[in-house]
Amino acid sequence: MTRESKKRRGTHMYFSEHNDNITYINHYGGLLEVNGKGFLSPEDLVVKEKSGKEWTKQFNTLNVCEGITEIKEGFLDAFSHVDCLIFSRTVTDAAVSPNLLKQLRDRNVLIRGEYDTFAESFAKANGLTFLHSDIHIADDEIKIACENDIITLRFHLNAPPDILYDCYTPGISAGSMGGGEFVKTLSPDFYVNCTIEMFAEKFSERVTDQILANDALKRFLKISNERL
């Protein structure tokens, strides 16, 4: 297991002026999440405090979260510069113009999502690289240490999968935040014949119930083994 320190940076939320159901949350590392219900349209790009499409240029990864079902033509054009597009399992269609599709191919944009969803079929149909999306495993609250760990199963194109422990602890002064990242590398075939119960045994009993109830992890283990 390796450890890396990380500078904590706050998030910021943008609200669509066109659709009250659509919000954007930016995270450190250039990630932008789109949250809401229903479809996304170009009009949803007009947000409070900012306008037009230029505000999107600061992000390199777009994550369309669960609840969004469709992406209308013109919306993704504002993100033609990103390196990675993540489609949740609720997304069933994303319209792209021939020009945008060419840009995605030329840039070799990575498409991420779950197996057997629109994300995977979209990547295959358009000659783009697909990688399973990371899976949030559990949140481990270690009260005795005043620590909270966000545990994530991560997949990589050119490296083995791993488990990320994103650790948060109180800082040295009021309102500050400490912590770091611990990474445990997994075998590429860690999922072979692995049940959800066997996977849960690798972690503290504090998070057993969370893991056993993790539907995304269950789907990954089931489909991965069916594909062997």
Image: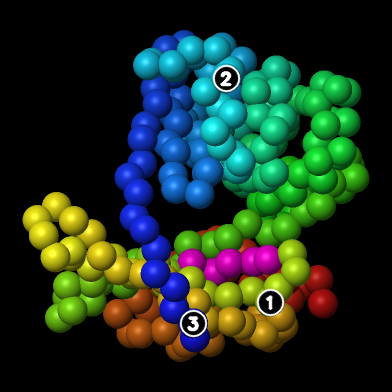
Horizontally, residue 55 falls left or right of residue 192, namely: left
Q: Amino acid at mark 2?
A: Glu
* Residue that appears at 71% across and 80% down: 188
> Is 95 above or below relative to 85?
above
Residue where numbered disc 2 is placed: 54
Residue 54 found in image quarter: top right
Badge 1 density bin: few <14, some 14–19, many ≥20, Cα 10 Å? some
* Residue that appears at 53% across and 87% down: 198
* Total numbered labels placed on residues in the image: 3
> Is 17 above or below relative to 208?
above
Residue 15 found in image quarter: top left
- Mark 1 or mark 3: which is in front? 3
Mark 2–mark 1 CB contact (< 8 Å): no
Give whichever of discs 3 and 2 has the lower sequence position.
3
- 19, 97: nearer the viewer: 97
Asked whether the viewer can see residue 42, the reply is yes
Q: Amino acid at mark 1?
A: Pro
* Residue that appears at 66% across and 51% down: 113
Residue where numbered disc 1 is placed: 160
Q: Position of residue 1 (x, y in %)?
A: 49, 86
Asked whether the viewer can see residue 20, the reply is no
Mark 1–mark 3 CB contact (< 8 Å): no
Residue where numbered disc 3 is placed: 2
* Residue that appears at 63% across and 57% down: 133
Per the image, label 2 sits on a secondary structure element best described as helix
Please report the bounds of the magenta region as a residue range: 152-156
Rendered image: mark on residue 76: none
Q: Amino acid at mark 3?
A: Thr
